[in-house]
Amino acid sequence: MTKKQIGNAPLILVLVAVLALGALWLLETVRRDDAPGGAPQDNLPEPALNAQQLYAARTPYVGDANKVAQLTDLLHYRENRETISLNTTAPPYELTVHYKMLPGELFPPGERPPEPLVLENAGILFALIGNVDRLVFSFDDGQDPFELIYTREDMEEWVGTDLRQMADSLDAFQDELLPLLTDLKESVSSP
């Protein structure tokens, strides 16, 4: 290699780095709308939930922080889950899932998340965490934080059954519970 070629090596490395960063920026921009705040495109599908992974993470106790965190990492909005908080000292046993996002990242400013997806998350958590009584989904975009709260009693009254029984086996979970929650999600999202 000549001295001239060696002298150009740092310049070439800088150009390659700039091109790589430009490509990453372009890929991120393509994923986004032109809407204010860079809201995701409405036509992007919500990632599918994996029934087998969810079922494998089930736990009888909300106090099993590792299993509970694993479950929340498999649900809708998983990429925005920041932390979980557990109240296990006395009933009602509670799980709070904290989500952090940029303004407009998941939905337009001033609007709430599509509740059907949060409702589906709640149904799955009530089915797979044996003793959780109350779920709080806390969304913080730094401007307009809010919470959606569900109780086991209300959810089971809504679906008409003990959700834990619908998670007695993987087959029951994926063939009965998940379709029931999909129907519920669709009925809530329909006008």
Image: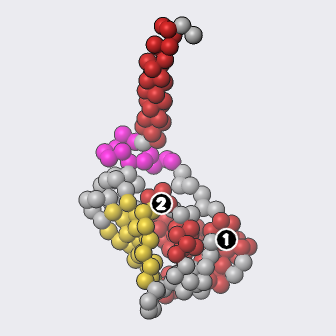
| Residue 48 seen in render | yes
What residue span does the magenta drawing correspond to?
33-44
Q: Which mark is residue 77?
A: 2
In this view, the mark in front (2 or 1):
1
Q: How crowded is mark 2: few (under 14 residues within 10 Å), some or many (20 or more)?
A: some
Residue with the mark numbered 1:
56
CA distance separating discs 2 and 1? 20 Å
Secondary structure that dominates the magenta span: loop
Residue 152 lies, in percent from the top left, at: 50, 84
Residue 8 lies, in percent from the top left, at: 46, 13
User: Is residue 62 rendered magenta in the image?
Assistant: no
Residue 101 lies, in percent from the top left, at: 37, 56
User: Is residue 36 rendered magenta in the image?
Assistant: yes
Q: In which quarter of the image is residue 191?
A: bottom left
Residue with the most extreme bottom position: 90
Residue at figure coordinates x 43%, y 83% from the top left: 87
Q: Which mark is residue 47?
A: none
Residue at figure coordinates x 47%, y 35% from the top left: 24
Query: 174 and 102: which one is in front?
Result: 102
